[in-house]
Image (cartoon, coloured by chain):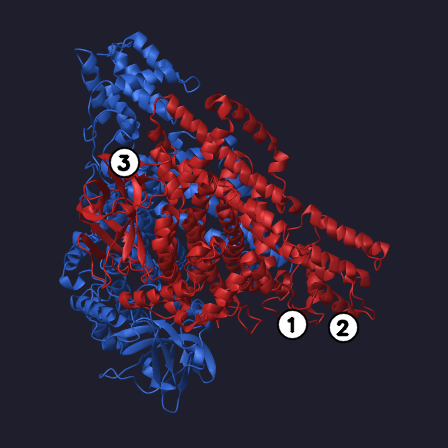
Chain colours: A blue, B red
Amino acid sequence: MDRHRYSQGVLQYIPLFYVIWSDDLLSISEINVVQSAIDKDSSLHQEDRALLGSWLDTQKPPQNSEMKYWKHLISNSQVKLLESALYPLSTFSQKMVCQYEKECPFNDQLKHIEIHLGIQPNHYNHLFEVEIEHASTSNYYSPKEIDALLKGKQAKVIDAFRKLMSDPIFDWGLHREKAEFRELVLQQVRYLGEKGYGAMAYPRAYGGTGNMEAYAGIFENLMYVDASLTIKFGVQFGLFGGSIQKLGTKKHHDQYLMAAGKAELLGCFAMTETRHGSNVRGIKTTATYDPKTDTLIVHTPGKDNNKEYIGNALHAKIATVFAQLIVNGENNGVHAILVPLRNEKHVLLPGISIEDNGYKLGLNGVDNGKIWFNQVAVARQNLLNKYGDIQDDGTYHSDIKDPNKRFFTMLGTLVGGRICVARASLGGAKMALAIAIKYALKRRQFNDTIKIQEDLLMDYPTHQLRLTPLVASAYVYHVTLENLMARYCDESQPDKRKVETQVAGLKSIITWYANSAIQECREACGGKGYLIENRIADLKGDVDIFTTFEGDNNVLLQLAAKGVLSDFKAEFNSTGFSSVLKILGIQINDKLTTINPVYANKVDKDHLYNPKFHKHAFNYRTRRLTYTLAMRIRDYIKKGVPAYQAFLKVQTHLLALGKAYSAELAYATYCDFAEAVPDEKNRLLFQKLGTLHALHAIREDASWYLEQGYLGGTKSKAIRQRVERLCTELRPHIGVLVDGFGIPEHCMTAPITK
Amino acid sequence: MDRHRYSQGVLQYIPLFYVIWSDDLLSISEINVVQSAIDKDSSLHQEDRALLGSWLDTQKPPQNSEMKYWKHLISNSQVKLLESALYPLSTFSQKMVCQYEKECPFNDQLKHIEIHLGIQPNHYNHLFEVEIEHASTSNYYSPKEIDALLKGKQAKVIDAFRKLMSDPIFDWGLHREKAEFRELVLQQVRYLGEKGYGAMAYPRAYGGTGNMEAYAGIFENLMYVDASLTIKFGVQFGLFGGSIQKLGTKKHHDQYLMAAGKAELLGCFAMTETRHGSNVRGIKTTATYDPKTDTLIVHTPGKDNNKEYIGNALHAKIATVFAQLIVNGENNGVHAILVPLRNEKHVLLPGISIEDNGYKLGLNGVDNGKIWFNQVAVARQNLLNKYGDIQDDGTYHSDIKDPNKRFFTMLGTLVGGRICVARASLGGAKMALAIAIKYALKRRQFNDTIKIQEDLLMDYPTHQLRLTPLVASAYVYHVTLENLMARYCDESQPDKRKVETQVAGLKSIITWYANSAIQECREACGGKGYLIENRIADLKGDVDIFTTFEGDNNVLLQLAAKGVLSDFKAEFNSTGFSSVLKILGIQINDKLTTINPVYANKVDKDHLYNPKFHKHAFNYRTRRLTYTLAMRIRDYIKKGVPAYQAFLKVQTHLLALGKAYSAELAYATYCDFAEAVPDEKNRLLFQKLGTLHALHAIREDASWYLEQGYLGGTKSKAIRQRVERLCTELRPHIGVLVDGFGIPEHCMTAPITK
């Protein structure tokens, strides 16, 4: 046996020192952890402490020859590394000492360092060149506990629903032919209606539970079955039924809501027109009141002014049609009218024309179609009249006098659907991530010359880096959307404008996130990800359109940014806008100067992992973008540029602000949640996920932070390294983290996950 | 008529001054252009010059009240703005003066400024609030001239081929059912074989023209018909036929090449295995020489060691099978063997099993399948024996002794296919861009309150910013790939290692670029982009896998980076690696210190638009990443970390270097091309596209440049503004730029382009 040059005390620290010096990532606070453990370690002599202490000087790191000798000691120890041991490094060190010395007690100070530095076998297993008993995934955390935290108070409903999802009607299958696919999805929707899930968000009087929050959870879970089902479900119960619930009055509820919730009455939501998707206010369809017959004449004025992309168009008996309401020659703006489309034999009624929209990139189980109306008369009572009505005397009346405000009030009632779309996209991302990670924990490729077995994909640093931050973000967005829906449903807060602004922004960033995540998963699975049987391909095609429907992301972000600007303006309304900007200029500049060079280059772990830093960074970006945006607009307007044009000129700036605001909001929401997790173990895990998400997001905008001087070059690099390091630290738990999404086993059909 | 406070001389400059001050983007060199024009303008009096000069001080810009008055003069002039005028601003100014004064000659100095500042109607048409005669696209440039420049010396072949593409067999249609789709694609491939296009790259003796460069052009153009056709064409003629041509010898050429080129003999290229896609060297299929029967026994050892994803697997009669060649018990590494799969009645031969890979996200017209071999004997002569042979005495012989080198030599012959894949992805991007831009030049949405007509999508700054840099990059990558193929085919340069490194990198960045471009186009077309009839959806599904096949991008980038590292090492081989790093450290640090603060914050237009700056930035990034990478690896190795593990630890760094190297190469190649464009008009256009591409690319990596101190915050912001400005400047020509791709009208079937 190799005789060594160190005392037993020093020897037990050799594996640790080899690990920490093989990468040069030691920060001051980490050195302090090691130093104080050494100071407290009673098994060490004074000269041991001196020697170990001398190896902690970042200015004068250990010699390479010294390190090679450490390596030699480790590799020749013939100790097996057990990754599944509770403290693998301390255990390894203990056994190594046993090889050379008679006594070899377990060292608690080493254990302390191992825990507090977060050193894990995958940091060093490749360095030691000893026999290794791998643990491809750790069972330190429990997927059930994580899932329970995510489900929150909706756990009971969600659990029951997941059980229902195992019904054979939801079995996954391949569907190329749209007619057959649509028929199946229709049956599934009817089944869910029968089981009471369609009416979930409706009042109890109409078969529901009034639980919109649970409805959103259900909606996300449907993605694990199929996205076409999710969307058709949303069209029937959320958009069609929801429009009756939210825009109609008791007579409509009594007549339609029960049947809608059971999917006995199939309906569609006919808002979008061929040339008017985002610009709903500009739609061309008219509904003209005819006092003689006491009817509304619904009409499509031009060949290209048809309703388009209307889900359920081929199956529906009736539609909620959005049209310009004209009474006594006066246009009262966009209103919703119930227009029957087909008779009980499913034959189109006179004046109605419907065409199939044909095949799409995805969602081919949804029957989207185009609808034309040729002077179709419906009873005046078909007007969904909660916010505007035609009275018995044939005059128009609304409690909301401002047509602009009336329009946004009506649209605002439908914002819940936007949250659901974001939830569904998140469900798609979770599904793709679970598949890609389960595959990466099985599939091996390449190896070094010594080993027989090839390496797991999940053990490649690039693979960790491409997938782990996406998993962390899924947690953050899940919590954010749960919270957003709770606030949307909170009846003690009737003014929903703020929530609407937030929904607009979050729907955008989350649907984009979902698309990138699914794309990354497709590529991470290579050719296998391209096969339909492995599910990611369909998710990709399906979720793609989520960035466009229920509000195009680029349009919504501008809406969100304008909301932020209004708040900004409102904050100082009393003192007047422009004078206030000057004051604020000083305040923000002051804030900027507090970003002194020390802060801008603070790279200590404690600082970089501190949510206060992340929150400050997100908030700084939002405030700064708001301020500069307001200044730019003001300058344009001062020079005589019309407001509409001024807003056009700052369009890219608006998008940046919309994103920044949403990012800040998501993280702040998540932090509150994570802090409140009752048990420490899971709380630390959730906080670590938040840290990874935040640092990754700050890195994405690093160029901006660097331009502003908020980040110095050193700090920006340190953040990049920390992101990589966190991905490595989470590597043993990545399998549990995707299991924590709670995707039912019976939905996990992809052969590559088996 | 409003009486004004200015002389006639000053009055004629008012529209110009209003335009340049409404945005504050004037750089020193631009002010100089205006100043010197004013100095030379003989129509001005001394006091006019003084007044105009006083409005050129960026430290003391004109008062807002002054500007509002300018605006008032313009808006009340009742002059119509004709966007299609040769010099719209000078013409407008002249007419405005005519409204107020008797004499109003055209001012040549104004015209000079208008040209040299690149001021275009879309910079100011929204500011003037006068009647405007819009020109949605300019005809200043000619699509035909641009197309001719792109086609270069292959023009004749490409033109003939584009004509052939109008044959009804290539008509676009919807294909959901794979059997029917594959049958059609097979007929198309046969038709192309009959017409001589399959053999194009083969020698004349075998029905070809030996023109691989034209073949690549054809390959790209096939994307305008359908990507499944492109890929099936590539499998049959490029991979299968190409493997015989490149790896076989005369006996194989004589026996197979003519029939392969005519698609009379259908074959496949069986390399990839289920668990070995990227790691080809580790494939499990064996070909064992049996001296008794003088045959090779081809065998799949385990159930999961089958060939997978093999194109043409369902139609082929024969396959080029890659297997470990075992002779006398010794493994000589991977070799290619021709193995018949089916008899003339299309029945599988004994020992062969083939399964359909099923439906994929895209390319469903290609029959990918899995193949198993159960002790299949083929004649020894079926070994494609150019680089290694079994001699008559039953011993193995190769002129290339090093098995590693032999393997890479064989694979290297197939690198041409990788260039073709990049070309095809580029074709997909061009097609999507052409569709999205044609749509954006027709579709209108939203408007301000004054106008009746809504605005064109293409006139939104965000729309310009999302699409224009992608168009510029399409030009850059087209030129790069043409050049790369020319060098690959250049027989005077037999050592292809450098080209192979370059292909690996460029294939990666270009296929990724193509995917992002297509995605952006899908979103830019909203819901219309999601409909199959509009073509973008299929392109998205089809091109997706290009990032994976013919080499996974992440693996290829590491290959490219290692190539760069080897060159780097070779440069200094005589003095030894590590001592040289020290010298180089000094050199690079010196280089770094030459990035003084003045350079890092130089924001003048002349500097930012100078290709020297762009080249310097790209080169700086490559060199710096190479150096730091080499240092990191050296440090790991010095500490005793095994080389394989050291490379794993720097994996993300390798990817960054691979990308940086490719970006540098693409731009340098393009600059040489653009400089050599003979006529000035088109040369300036090509150079402007290059500038937009380069500045956009530098912006993408801005965080890195800022971290390094190469860019200061001011310069980074200035680059962002320049990118937006260039997009605006190119707006009138964007229609011509996509027409310049030369996509045949008969392929442009998307209804939204009509």
In contact (CB < 8 Å): disc 1 and disc 3: no
Q: Nearer the viewer, mark 3 or mark 2?
A: 3
- Measured along the vertical axis of the image, is residue B457 above or below residue B41? below
- Measured along the vertical axis of the image, is residue A594 above or below residue B474? above
Q: x and y percent of residue B462 in the render?
A: 51, 58
Asked if residue B5 can be seen in this view, the reply is yes
- Residue toward you, A676 or A98: A98
Residue B131 disc label: 1
Type of amino acid at the residue the image marks with label 3: Thr
Residue B395 disc label: 3
Query: In the shown orientation, is residue B274 left or right of residue A284?
Result: left
Query: In the shown orientation, is residue B589 left or right of residue B240?
Result: right
The crowd level at tag 1 (other Cα within 10 Å; few <14, some 14-19, many 20+) is: some
Query: In the shown orientation, is residue A72 left or right of residue B160?
Result: left
Q: Quadrant of residue A124?
A: top left
- Measured along the vertical axis of the image, is residue B457 above or below residue B40? below
Among numbered discs 1 and 2, the one appearing first in the sequence? 2
Query: In the shown orientation, is residue B39 left or right of residue B88?
Result: right
Q: Which residue is mark 2?
A: B1
**Marks 3 and 2 on same chain:** yes
Among numbered discs 3 and 2, the one appearing first in the sequence? 2
Q: Quadrant of residue A466?
A: top left
